[in-house]
Image (tube, helix red, strand yellow):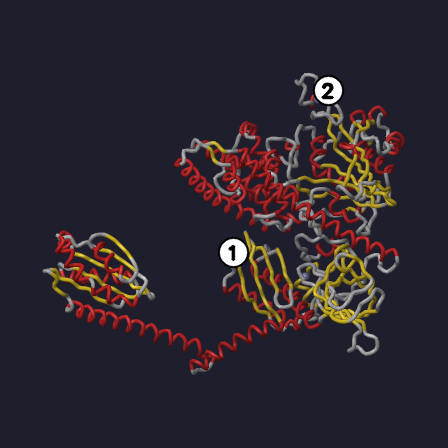
Amino acid sequence: MKRMSGAEVRQSFLDFFASKGHLIVPSAPLVPVGDPTLLLTNAGMNQFKNIFLGLEEPKHTRVADAQKCMRVSGHLNDLEEVGPSPYHHTFFEMMGNWSFGDYYKREAIRWAWELVTEVWGMEKDRLWATIFEDDQGDLPTDEDARGYWQTETDVRHDHILTFGRVDNFWAMGPVGPCGPCSEIHYDRGPEYCDKQDEPGHVCGVNGDCARYLEFWNLVFIQYNRDADGVLVELPAKHIDTGMGLDRVTTMSQGVVANYETDLFQPIFHRVQEMLGHSDEEVRENKVPYRVIADHGRGITFLVGDGVIPGNEGRNYVLRMILRRAARFGRKLGFTGPFLGQVAETVIDMFGGHYDELVRRKEFILNVIRQEEERFQRTLDVGLSILDEIMERLRDESETSIPGVEAFRLYDTFGFPLDLTRDVAAEHGFAVDEAGFQDALEEQRARARAAQQFVVSDVEELEVYARLADELRNQGHLGPDGVEHPYDQTLELESIVLAIVRDGEVVSSAREGDEVEIVLAATPFYVESGGQVSDTGILARYDDERDEPQWEVDVEEMRQPVPGLIVHVGRVTHGRPRVKDPAWALVDAARRVDIARNHTATHLLHSELRYILGEHVQQAGSLVAPDRLRFDFTHGAMLTQEELDAVEQSVNDAILANYPLLAEEKSYQEAVAAGAMALFGEKYGDEVRVIEIGVPGEPFSQELCGGTHVRHTGEIGLFRIISEGSVGAGVRRIEAVTGRAAQQVVQKRLGVLDAAATHLGTAPEEVDRAVLRLMGESHDQQKEIANLRRQLARLEFETLLNRVQQVNGVQVLAERVQATDTETLREMTDWLRNQLGSAVIVLGAVIEDKPNFVAAITPDLVERGIKAGNLIKQVARVVGGGGGGRPTLAQAGGRDPNRLDEALELVPGVVADLVDGT
Ligand SMILES: [Zn+2]
Ligand SMILES: [Zn+2]
């Protein structure tokens, strides 16, 4: 076989299929678009799923691509395989060619053979083909495929083998599209067998050694399996093929493992260079090197598609693999962040084909660096929690860390099991790994339960899929579905095509019913790209428009399956029926508010990039009628100066009253012209670009399907109301425009006017007046404190005059004013110092409760008067208790009205105590 770089393999695959009339489409993002059942894109066919399910019409019937994929189930065990095993990866690329009801088995087989033998020069003797023969005896053997292998190719006939359902039958799920497949295997030669030492081992296709490699799977989507498990032959049959780029590159470069190809090696070299390792050291540390190479690719591509580390779903997957890579880096000897350099290498390696990596380079490096630093802190926290656990166990004479604790560390703090194991071992502890696995299994069961729920959602979708099919067959829906002139149209007359109530298609509805209504055409915008749906009404008017026969309040819009738009709402009046004429009226004032916020969002995005730098990328957006929310990548909090500058320049752009232009362009053309494409959006070939600025020289160009004002001046006013952080390297600005901005300004000016009135000054003078008041208030506080001190001194002097003599002991028992017990103690101290030898009991009502402090000088303690005993007897009167040292004690009680009565007891108690000696 010809020797090629990974990039050459990829490009020659795409070029080959382009020459066979295929449209080469870009990879869909790793974040699946419009598919809530999927965490991450994990197969080449994901982005075509709706076509196979018959929910979406293909725009082209022959397509080929190289698709970014991630397989990380979130299960610890699978991930732990990456590194120790040379075959497991998280990120990989799947190349595929597709026919949607176009060519079938004959061409798929002929072209596959042509590519691998003629273009790539694979030796024919080394190639094997497999076809389907049902091991359960229900389905026919795929004789068509066998025939084409024999007539369309010159593969050796004894190299065509049959296999059963496990190897050669493919299904999308328990129900849905499925069919037989045909695989191509490559015999690398006996020297590649890694089981030569095992007695009885025989190498073979679909065997268990490394000699024969399956590298291309051609799936013939022939049937649809219905809910009863019955296979129904499809009218339009499809081709779906998948070839792992890593594997073919490994074969082409004549190496044993994927890690040895140029799809991984540059990362090894970069790490080696950073650590100054010898080649020998690299070999000795192959597991950490592999982990860093594999995970380094994964995290770079994930962040490149807008995923940010977090604690749920795909965000958690990213965090998990990033931390695993960081941890293995520490094992290798890195003491600081290093994954940024790894990511740079990955961007150099793959940026040529996946240009989003280059465009988002700064963002990618920033997010990775911040998460790596955060992980260092997590490690510290985890270690201290582990210390606490071990300390407690030591007290309980336990020697094993419970599985639930290890799991909690793993699940909550991202603290990996093997790290827990290492640290535990250092301190002489074991880890209950079975308990850990149980806890993990429980979590998986919960995850599976959640998955089931999603499946039932999919079944619910079938109602709409069937409805869309029916309407299409009856000619009511165009090829693109419901006619949808949403941009500048706010009302139009249409016809009711369908009514859905409680998940069932019905022919009419009554007043009060919650319904979903499908019209043949609608001007209502359906939530997308962050812009919320329109609201409004549907109504049937016969003659006079102000007397509707029936009316529906539309609260929400949905597109449950492509092309079918439903108005969700309540019948407020009358009885809507299918086939009724109906007016669709968008709430126009609300729509204009939304448009203002949407256009302002574009201005904000562009000004942020201008003022903060090109690293600013949109990371999320909400466009509602009352406000806009914009999340963007930026490493630091915005200063007040930056916020002021951003607000000012957005308002400048509004005042300049720039026109807006919506243009349809090809995706390539738009991006080449500098239009900003957003994370996580799947774009067709034709995209809509919103340009703002002087025509021909727009300063803002974004791919966008939303609604906008015609000129920026219509926005009126833009005001930022908050700025904050929403995660590593991502900031959030909330702002208002138009009416809402006016309200904010009006409200604040109102407050200012009121304050001015209260202050008896002009609004412009308010701040000065407030400063003056604050100054005065400060002076008065000082004065008050002074007076208080004088008062206190006077009070103390009065108190000293109240000292009584009880059997030769000076006794002072008085009520005083104090705001807390601390003050009460200080007063007692001061009096004790003044009196030299005395029993002092002070009482005060603090927060409606009686409180006492008793102080006894040491000479009197020796005479048997203990503060604790004394105060207990006193406090009993007010229903309380207390205690303390012999020289100082404190007590509280419940009844403040009996405070004086309690204090009056003191001389008597002292007399008793002194007598008692
Ligand atoms: Zn073998
Ligand atoms: Zn937009």
Question: Which three-letter amino acid code belongs to the residue tagged 1?
Answer: Ala
Q: Which mark is drawn over residue 636?
A: 1
Farthest top residue in view: 199
Residue in view at x 45 percent, y 39 percent: 386
* Figure quarter occupied by ligand 1: top right
Measured along the vertical axis of the image, is residue 518 above or below residue 197? below
Residue in view at x 18 percent, y 63 percent: 831
Measured along the vertical axis of the image, is residue 866 above or below residue 697? above
Give how far across and how far down residue 96 sits, in percent.
Answer: 76, 41
Give how far across and how far down residue 253 sits, in percent.
Answer: 70, 30
Closer to us: 641 or 903: 903
Q: CA distance from mark 2 to mark 1?
A: 61 Å
Question: Which three-letter amino acid code belongs to the residue tagged 2?
Answer: Val
Q: Specify the quadrant that holds the N terminus.
A: top right
Give the total of numbered labels: 2
Q: Does residue 160 appear to the left or right of 894 in the view shown?
A: right
Residue in view at x 59 percent, y 43 percent: 343
Give how far across and how far down residue 326 sits, in percent.
Answer: 53, 40
Closer to us: 390 or 751: 390
Secondary element type, mark 2: loop
Q: Which mark is drawn over residue 202?
A: 2
Ligand 1: does it lie within 8 Å of the C-beta at label 2? yes
Give how far across and how far down residue 667 sits, in percent.
Answer: 74, 54
Q: Residues within 10 Å of mark 2 (few under 14, many from 20)?
A: few
Q: Does residue 865 appear to the left or right of 318 in the view shown?
A: left
Between circles 2 and 1, the one closer to the viewer is 2
